[in-house]
Amino acid sequence: MYAALCGNMEMAKLKWTLDALKASAAKYKTRAEWSKAEINAYSAAKTRGLLDEVCTHMPKPVRWTIKNLKESAAKYKTRNEWNKGDPRAYVAAKKRGLLDEVCQHMPKPQRWTTEKLKASAANYKTREEWIKEDPAAYRTARDRKILDQVAPHIPKLKRWTLELLKASAAKYKTRKAWMNGDSGAYSTAHKRGVLDECCAHMKRIGNRNNRAIYAFEFADNSVYVGLTYDVTKRKREHHMKPTSKLMAAKFASDVPYVFRVLTDYLPVDEAARLEGEVLASYQAEGWNSLNSSATGSLGTNEVKWTLDKLKESAAKYKTRGEWQKKEPRAYDAASNHGLLDECCDHMKPVRESWTLEKLKASAAKYGTKKEWREAEPSAYSSARGRKLLDECCAHMQPIRKSWTPDKLKSSAAKYKTKKEWQKAEPDACSAARKHGIYDDCCSHMPKRAKSQKSNKGAHSGQLQLF
């Protein structure tokens, strides 16, 4: 299909039959490893309820009880050793607040006083050496913002030569990765006008003149087609704030989907024209469109943000959070170009001191944890980090139902088809898949016709790989 639309673009035809899925899964030892390496195959198996059948050679996910956690922890002498040796067990214990209980035989973590931090820093001549040899001490001093106090003998700033900037840039594949990984070096290169020279080896992503076409293919045969200059960022944005109400409903109902990048970054006019043709081809094959507006829209990213324009925008606000909320495009442009500090030098960091009383007062305004998290993320994060969620949210209704196998089977028994069950009780469907009993719960329901699987598989197989 896309060969006709995209001219000389090379097509990759993949038809995920049961044998093809088994062959793909056989290369890996765990489901996580398979999902990371071949997400398309894994998603196809998950959507069609075939995970248990094709993953029989893999260990089943462990259900961590307190007994299992204690048995795992007993093999190690320190928490750090346990985290490295059995990270899944360690993370499970940490998430459930059971670390102290299962690690009673281990020495307690180091309590860093100012004197201990000074003693640690005294052993090193540079921050790089300190970070490498005693990262816990360095992170503690950094987080408490007392680096200068405990390490006055260590040079504060690194003098960036062109050679050092190039060496830093060489560790990264894209400018964004460099900016996130070593913001100091990136910002210095930008200010000195040597970004292009330092980034000559990097592969550029799209921009306002070049866009790629992507699609969200949902399991209920609905599709959303769009174009973007950064597919990774756009996928994340759709989850945070979907542009289509119909699409938002799909995410809210946890309808399975596959995210596909259909083209490379094309000239913007060609991409805008091709987007409409791609959506039309989907509709011709029986897919239901979730696009709420006409295709070909390029959004509002056509503004060219100069340093003066960014400063003018930032000058209207007192905090970075306020600027990001009111003018997110200007804020993102400053962040992407490493200019946040320069544009925000008039702003003062505002940090709310969250006492238990303030957290309870904040939580009291909302009926569920989700409402609180979305409305006041700072308060919610503070309560979660300090393990005060249960105390602050005692008045709230639980947002998650505890699904046992019997409850899931009772839920499924009310419906005649999988689609009907998914539409009426999406939470139950998702829980059944996660517990690996989806097929068992749906054993009384008719299976999908083979012709439908064949048609959908044939369409899913026609995609462009980049």
Image: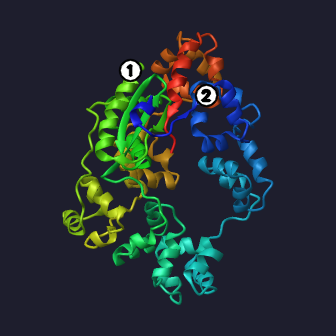
Residue at the image point whose x is 34% and y is 76% from the top: 191
Q: Is residue 52 visible?
A: no
Element type at mark 1: helix
Task: Name the amino acid, label 2.
Answer: Trp
Callout 2 crowding tier (Cα within 10 Å): few <14, some 14–19, many ≥20: many
Q: Earlier in the sequence, mark 1 or mark 2?
A: 2
Left or right: residue 69 compared with residue 9: right
Relative height, residue 86 to residue 3 (above, below): below
Q: Is residue 313 visible?
A: yes
Left or right: residue 141 compared with residue 296: right
Coordinates of residue 43 in the picture (x, y in percent): 57, 33
Q: Quadrant of the N terminus?
A: top left
Nearest the eye: 28 or 3: 3
Q: How is the image coloured?
A: rainbow
Question: Which residue is identified by label 1?
Answer: 284
Question: Which residue is identified by label 2?
Answer: 16
Left or right: residue 292 compared with residue 409: left
Coordinates of residue 222 in the picture (x, y in percent): 41, 25
Element type at mark 2: loop
Task: Name the amino acid, label 1.
Answer: Ala
Q: Are marks 1 and 2 in contact (CB under 8 Å)?
A: no
Relative height, residue 240 to residue 190 (above, below): above
Quadrant hosting residue 365: top left
Coordinates of residue 393 in the picture (x, y in percent): 45, 43
Callout 1 crowding tier (Cα within 10 Å): few <14, some 14–19, many ≥20: few
Nearest the eye: 13 or 433: 13
